[in-house]
Image (tube, rainbow, N blue to C red):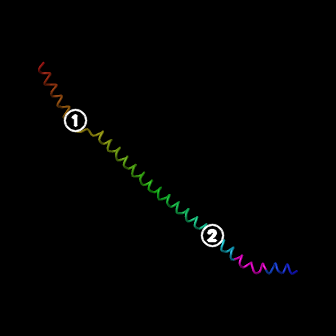
């Protein structure tokens, strides 16, 4: 029975040290998991910032294109008055040349 008693004595003396070592390992694993989780959260936040900028720039681009289209439609519908005067000038010349013949 002396071997059994020695075994239990060894367990009693080594158990607190092993328990402390296990606690430290658990703390270290939790710390590493926490660190990994923080890194993942930082990456996600960085992606959100990039997506926000892309969305803002896309909205500005759509507004700019809309303004450009509106301006082009406005310019195409509005006929400048000097073109009317220009065509009227030729109409007068035609009448002048018709009289000479």
In this rendering, the answer to whether 98 lies above or below 52 is above
Question: How many labels sit on residues?
Answer: 2
Dot 1 or dot 2: first in sequence order is 2
Which residue is at 68% across, 77% downward? 20
- For disc 2, the neighbor class at 10 Å (few under 14, some 14 to 19, many from 20) is few
- In the picture of the structure, the residue carrying the numbered disc 2 is 30
Query: Looking at this rendering, what residue extends furthest in the right direction?
Result: 1
Which residue is at 81% across, 79% downward? 8
Task: Residue 42 in the image: state x and y as whole percent.
Answer: 52, 63
Task: Residue 50 in the image: state x and y as whole percent.
Answer: 47, 56
Q: Is residue 10 left or right of residue 66?
A: right
Q: Secondary structure at mark 2?
A: helix
In this rendering, the answer to whether 52 lies above or below 19 is above
**Depth order, front residue of 33/50:** 33
- Splitting the image into 4 quarters, where does residue 15 fall? bottom right
- For disc 1, the neighbor class at 10 Å (few under 14, some 14 to 19, many from 20) is few
Q: Is residue 42 left or right of residue 88?
A: right
Question: Where is the N terminus found, in terms of image quarters?
Answer: bottom right
Query: Looking at this rendering, what residue extends furthest in the left direction?
Result: 100
Task: Residue 85 in the image: state x and y as whole percent.
Answer: 19, 35
Q: Is residue 52 within the magenta segment?
A: no
**Depth order, front residue of 26/50:** 26
Question: Where is the C terminus found, in terms of image quarters?
Answer: top left
- In the picture of the structure, the residue carrying the numbered disc 1 is 83
Viewer-side label of 1, 2: 2
What range is drawn magenta here?
10-19
Task: Residue 27 in the image: state x and y as whole percent.
Answer: 64, 72
């Amino acid at each position: 029975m002396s071997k059994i008693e020695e075994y239990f004595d060894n367990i009693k003396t080594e158990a607190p040290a092993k328990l402390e070592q296990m606690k430290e390992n658990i703390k270290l694993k939790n710390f590493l998991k926490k660190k990994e989780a923080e890194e993942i959260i930082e990456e996600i936040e960085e992606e959100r910032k990039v997506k926000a900028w892309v969305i803002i720039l896309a909205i500005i681009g759509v507004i700019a294109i809309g303004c450009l289209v509106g301006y082009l439609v406005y310019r195409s519908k509005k006929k400048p008055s000097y073109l009317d005067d220009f065509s009227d000038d030729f109409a007068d010349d035609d009448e002048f040349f018709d009289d000479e013949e």
